[in-house]
Image (tube, rainbow, N blue to C red):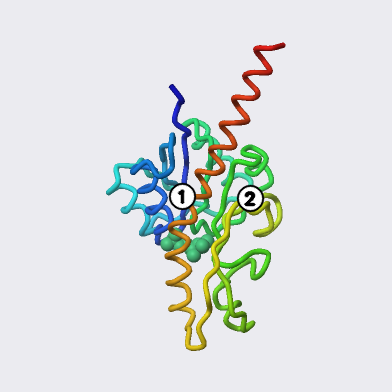
Amino acid sequence: MIERARIGILISGRGSNMAALADAVREGRVPNAEVVVVLSDQPTAAGLSKAKERGIETLVIERRGRGRAEHDREIVAALSERHVELVCLAGYMRVLSPEFIGSFRGRILNIHPSLLPSFPGLDAQKQALEHGVKWTGCTVHVVDETLDGGPIIAQRAVRVSDDDTVESLSGRILEQEHELYAEAVSLVLASLLAESLTAKRSDSES
Ligand code: GRF
């Protein structure tokens, strides 16, 4: 039997992507996976109650005036204790330390509301409107040391209308984000599984 991949989701706020991903996992749309913890750096994050409603363990690890490296060490320890294999950032509003990224190299994903590499950073939907692009969208990418610059896993395009506001455009992008994250996680887990099967086979042959 294939063991289920253990996913940890990091949030700072509303948590709608977290909820959509957790629902996709529970409904088997992301095969062979389970969400084992939802972690927030903000005690008031609305997403925490959405996770609790779904019966998922929640953890709050606040920055409390500490440096980024120290805060991240506590988060990495909490994820490692729970044997988390894939970390999904879902509206997590902090930049990760190099140590955090190194601890989960290639196994941290983020979702961003633009077609990267266009409009990285904050307020991506506003940046798209201000630039006058006719198409924008959302991207799931691997997190590396660059800001929103890691390898792209999946994207969805969204048409910009002449009368769009930041709110209307963000809403249509968000609908696509909710479907895209589950698809991207499925792809990544399939490739991690293939890698581990290949590694096991070459171990047994040597
Ligand atoms: C989403 O637009 C996501 O792309 C961005 O932050 C927002 C988080 O929304 N990184 P939610 O907390 O998942 O509802």
Which residue corresponds to mark 2?
143
Q: CA distance from mark 1 to mark 2?
A: 17 Å
Q: Three-letter amino acid code at disc 1? A: Ala
Q: In this rendering, would 105 be left or right of 184?
A: right
- Mark with earlier residue (1, 2): 2
Q: Position of residue 181 (x, y in %)?
A: 49, 53
Q: In this rendering, would 50 be left or right of 74?
A: left
- Residue found farthest to the left: 53
Q: Of helix, strand and loop, which one carries label 2?
A: loop
Q: Three-letter amino acid code at disc 2? A: Val
Q: In the rendered image of this protein, does residue 60 appear above or below residue 172?
A: above
Out of 100 and 16, give the one closest to the viewer. Answer: 16
- Tally the marks: 2
Q: Of helix, strand and loop, which one carries label 1?
A: helix
Instruction: Tell me where residue 105 sits by quadrant.
Output: top right
Residue at figure coordinates x 53%, y 33% from the top left: 80
Q: Position of residue 73 (x, y in %)?
A: 59, 40
Residue 182: which disc? 1
Q: Tell me whether the residue at label 1 lies in contact with that at label 2, contact meaning CB atoms closer than 8 angstroms.
A: no
Residue 82: which disc? none
